[in-house]
Image: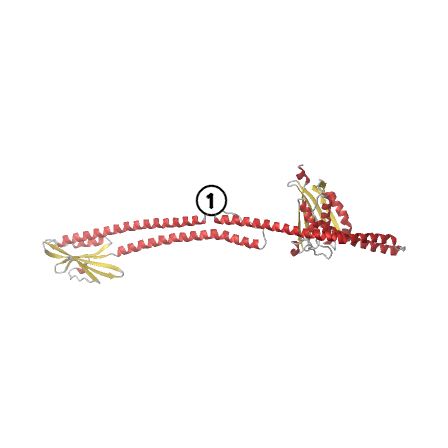
Amino acid sequence: MRVVFSNLSFKTKFLLMMVSLFSLLVVCLFILYAMAEQELIEEVRHQTEELSTAIQLSVEEISKSDEAVDIEKIKGITSFKKKGIKELSVIDSARDVIASSNASLIGKKLKLKGESFKTIGNVTEYTSTSDGQKRFDILLPVVVDRELLGYVHIATEFDDFTDLARSNHLRRLTATIIIFAIGILLTLYFAKTYTGPIQEIADAARKVAAGDMTVQLKVRGLDEIGALTSNFNDMVRRLSDNNALQEKLKEAEQMSKIGVLASGIAHEVRNPLNFINLSIDHLRVAYGPEDALRREAYLASIAGIKSEIDRLNGMVSNFLDYGRRLTLNLKRMDLRPIIAETLVLVSDSAGAQNITIETIQSDEAVEVQADYRHLKTCFINIFLNAIQAMPDGGKLTINVALSNDNGIAGVMVSDTGCGIAPENLSKIFEPYFTTKEIGIGLGLALTRRIIEEHGGSLTIESEQGRGTDASIKLPAARRLSGV
């Protein structure tokens, strides 16, 4: 039932609430009116019985010619009933009180006063108000055979009807207040039920506007709020897809521009570099000094020049590799030998900076489907970045592992270097971004691209002053081959 109600539209819920409150109010007022009507009928019946009894008894007593009026019986009328008749008196034709429920009036002349009086036939009615209660003095003549025997004076106070009406009005007012209080509580409940999710959507929209495209809200029910939440989630997913597409288009545009630039650099720079490299080799052989000490310094200078030429040639190669479309020659291979061969290439640089290298790996082969040359380039870039982050020494740890559960081959490269500043961590994969004095900022961008072309992922976590962790994940060969 609760699930069905939660799936109703807001308009239907609101309509049901109003109809329910209206029905409850009508039923309550109907019951209260019925009760009030019954009480009023009962009260009028009592008053009528008292008045009839009083008139009947008074006429009987005043008509007695041979007996004295029974004062006690007259008193009994006013004491038997606590409502209606307050005083009953029997008066002779000379208006002397011969019997009364009020003993202080017996033997005195009856004097009636009122704010107003009216005569209906032979009956005179005086009306007065005292202490908020309305008093009616009725003077009824008793005539037998056209002879006036006397009068019957009946004093009544109908404050009981006023109290009854006031009580009924108070009950109706109380019932109305209670029902409206229920309506207010239900309105507050609906307001909280609907404004809460709307506020969540507003907060999520602010996060999306700030660039967080991972926001997803929980869909509650099938009403308007549920539909709004579902549509918001779809919008965020589409925005995320559009942003990813824009990033890819931006990257493709950059690659296109870099490809054109790389082609120009290849023609304009590489040919002179090759010529310079050959000339340096010729100078090293043809013009080397005979003196041993001078020859050693000469060869060291030549080696330095060739090293710079190789570095420039490497930059040109990075341009070319990043700008052109990758063509992978995938073969099944073990990651452990590739990492070992790469560490041999960087071991001299690590040793010169007093860096210790530790490799953690299992005896089991960690096989992937990969391009040997491109994958080796990735490891060289990551290892060199780690070594360059530890100029004063440190520790480089390479952990190679295979997860049989999800078929992932993982390589974790950790260093104890200076780390990456938080404001730079989100930019490290952008082309041309670098904080180094040398380099053009294509190493990590090219590395991630190669890893993703292999169907893997590259993530980097870093804390400034404590070091950096680079995690490479590749699909294991056994999952791809069905082994």
Q: How many marks?
A: 1
The reply to whether residue 449 is in sight is yes
The residue beneath circle 1 is 3
Residue 130 location (% of width, % of height): 25, 61
Report the side of 22 relative to 302 (left or right): left
- Report the amino acid beneath label 1: Val
Q: Residue at x 23, y 59 (%)?
A: 135
Q: What is the residue that sits farthest to the right in this orientation?
A: 290
Q: Nearer the viewer, residue 292 or 182?
A: 292
Image quarter of the C terminus: top right
Alpha-carbon neighbours of circle 1 within 10 Å: few (<14), some, or many (≥20)?
Answer: few
Q: Nearer the viewer, residue 171 or 55?
A: 171
Residue 466 location (% of width, % of height): 68, 54
Residue 355 location (% of width, % of height): 75, 51
Snapshot colouring: secondary structure
Residue 256 location (% of width, % of height): 68, 51
Image quarter of the N terminus: top left
Q: Helix, strand or loop at disc 1?
A: helix
The reply to whether residue 353 is in sight is no
Report the side of 152 relative to 22 (left or right): left
Q: Nearer the viewer, residue 423 or 359?
A: 423
Where is residue 365, by image quadrant? top right
Report the side of 50 relative to 10 (left or right): left
Q: Residue at x 29, y 55 (%)?
A: 165
Report the side of 152 relative to 281 (left or right): left
